[in-house]
Image: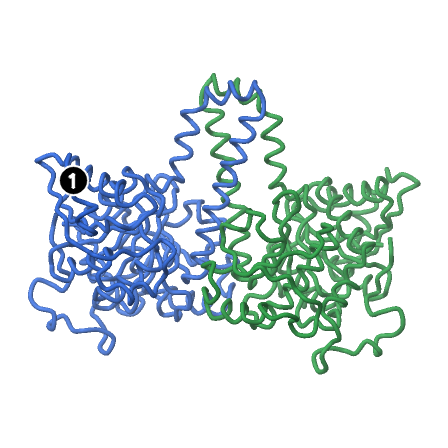
Chain colours: A blue, B green
Amino acid sequence: MIAVDAMGGDHAPAEIVAGAIAAARDLGIRVAITGRPGQLRPLLTRLPASADVYIEPAEESVAMHEGALASWRRPRSSIAVACQLVRRGQAGAVVSAGSTGAIVATAKLRLRPVPGVARPALAVALPTRPTPTVLIDAGAIADPKPELLVQFAQLGVAYAEIAFGIAEPRVGLLTIGAEPGKGNKLARRGYELLDTDQPHGGLPISFAGNVEGGDLLSGKVDVIVTDGFTGNVALKTLEGTAKFAADQVREVLGSSRATWAAALLQRRGLRELNERFDPETYGGAALLGLEATVVIAHGAVTARGATAACKLAAELIERRITERIRERLGPSRAGHFLRRADRGPGGATGVVSH
Amino acid sequence: MIAVDAMGGDHAPAEIVAGAIAAARDLGIRVAITGRPGQLRPLLTRLPASADVYIEPAEESVAMHEGALASWRRPRSSIAVACQLVRRGQAGAVVSAGSTGAIVATAKLRLRPVPGVARPALAVALPTRPTPTVLIDAGAIADPKPELLVQFAQLGVAYAEIAFGIAEPRVGLLTIGAEPGKGNKLARRGYELLDTDQPHGGLPISFAGNVEGGDLLSGKVDVIVTDGFTGNVALKTLEGTAKFAADQVREVLGSSRATWAAALLQRRGLRELNERFDPETYGGAALLGLEATVVIAHGAVTARGATAACKLAAELIERRITERIRERLGPSRAGHFLRRADRGPGGATGVVSH
């Protein structure tokens, strides 16, 4: 089962619930939607008998402008309640289109890390072909220690394998020059750590060396590792530039009668192009390294995007992303984490297949 | 006079020299081209009598793949000789399309800083309208101290004023969230320093707060300040995404007979669009804060781009960018720099109007 925060997002709850219903109806995914029952119940009136959607009451919600502090201020928010469903073993993943800062903070507060993971990181899929490129960390940790970059690599590799079926994903380190030793202190030390045969006792990483900002969409590697500050700036720059270019194309196409006619001819091709940068298509970012994956859909998603996010979450559960992360990281190191034995039989993840 | 490194760039020396000749002929700029006389002399045979171009011999050159170490290895390289012309008071600016790393290192080694400038920084103009947005630092200093961010702001403001005629440029700090306190340690401390009325005794900065990656092309501010690591990643990401989008548009337009016909109709509009991201149009990046500005043209420039770089360099001299930087930074602080009195009458810049 997946837990969907029905109150997060610009078009919540109507579009989120509609997306969840579609996921349940068309994809057979079991869904719990969290939020105010009085608002949610009317949205379920047209629920087909075959769809398995139920309401888990949450009295509070986090506004889109609220940041990380909301995680403390609102213990009964719809996102907090979604995380609680995971803790109780009822859900295997969380979906939210709310404020990224609040989601990350709430998830870190309420969900346990996978053994071996020091801090969870945010992965986004960039629209390269034939398979997407995973950028990690896209904003969860602004000032990581170099050792964390190795962990980001392991999380990103697991994600590329599980979410996109990429065998032996190649990992690149985002920096400012192709040669080893280029970059700031963090990147230079990160290079040294990634460039060893078997970093930190985990599974080997196929490290392809440094990549630059121009490689985010080049498809040169499958996973691009960076700190959350640089990753977030790069991601926002990419999105902003793509939007800028799309606006420019639209302006050019709309700028005369002749081109207006031409634009009609090309509508289909341009639609395909737009979709490659469309958050509705991709399902969203994934917060990796906690006992359940949290899929963060774009704040502006409509029902279609919410369904895509539910689909991604269900696939991550079914293909056992958490198990894969644990495998990749190898035996957990003492001191950092609870030992597995403390967490009962059946694993610590509370993963329930949908 | 400007000193043009004739041997730097993918199409050096032919295209660079052709561009320098055009600048001399059409814009009345005095130019010294540095490089091997045997290679350069034949390129000057068609020089019109009115154009003032002479050859300054340099036996060595720096290959495009060479980095910062070339500045030590090749004291008689064409870029080093161009810098020497400034030191001797013969040139007021340097133009090169060579390897950025080698140019920056050579210039730092051979040119004095403006009093008050701890380290020079690289400024690029992003193609916003009506005026460009200055991104600084775009790659000169990967690990600056927070205090340097204030200096980058002063350099960027002087550049926006002088190169683009922007009155009271608004300055934004590149980070990962709009509110104060968002970002990594460097950005958070940078915010505090920029958010004071009169930072460090220089002229006041019109600080507009935080901006994000999506604002690089939004025109929200005139100057965007960041460290050289983040700035370079953002710049390369922007360029890569613009190229990706342009390739996609081309693919869509070329994908069927109907759209092929339509593409012809739109050729003009698309050409205008491409030009906005074309390094040939903008003249290049500027290394600011040394006794002479170094304009770094894109490695792939042809004659047209080389001319644009010469024009930018000449304008920066004529409008006294170095004086403006000194004014903005205010009285130099002891310990860091030579005092002005030590550097003779007429200023330390060796600026000669062209």
Residue A151, located in which quarter of the rendered image?
A: bottom left
When the figure is inspected, residue B114 is found, relative to residue A134, above or below; the finding is below
Residue A221 at what x, y percent from top left? 39, 50
Q: Residue furthest bottom?
A: B335
User: Residue at the location (62% across, 26% down)?
Assistant: B268
User: Residue at the location (49% across, 31% down)?
Assistant: B249
Chain of the residue displaying label 1: A
User: Residue at the location (55% across, 69% down)?
Assistant: B190
CA neighbours of label 1 inside 10 A, class few (<14), some (14 to 19), many (20+) = some
Say left or right for B110 vs A232.
right
Say left or right for A123 vs B201.
left
Residue A135 at what x, y percent from top left? 38, 53
For the residue labelled by badge 1, is the local secondary structure a helix, a strand or a loop? helix
User: Residue at the location (77% across, 78% down)?
Assistant: B338
Q: Looking at numbered disc 1 in the image, what kind of residue is underneath it?
A: Leu
Residue A78 at what x, y percent from top left? 23, 55
Q: Which residue is mark 1?
A: A44
Say left or right for A350 vs B243.
left
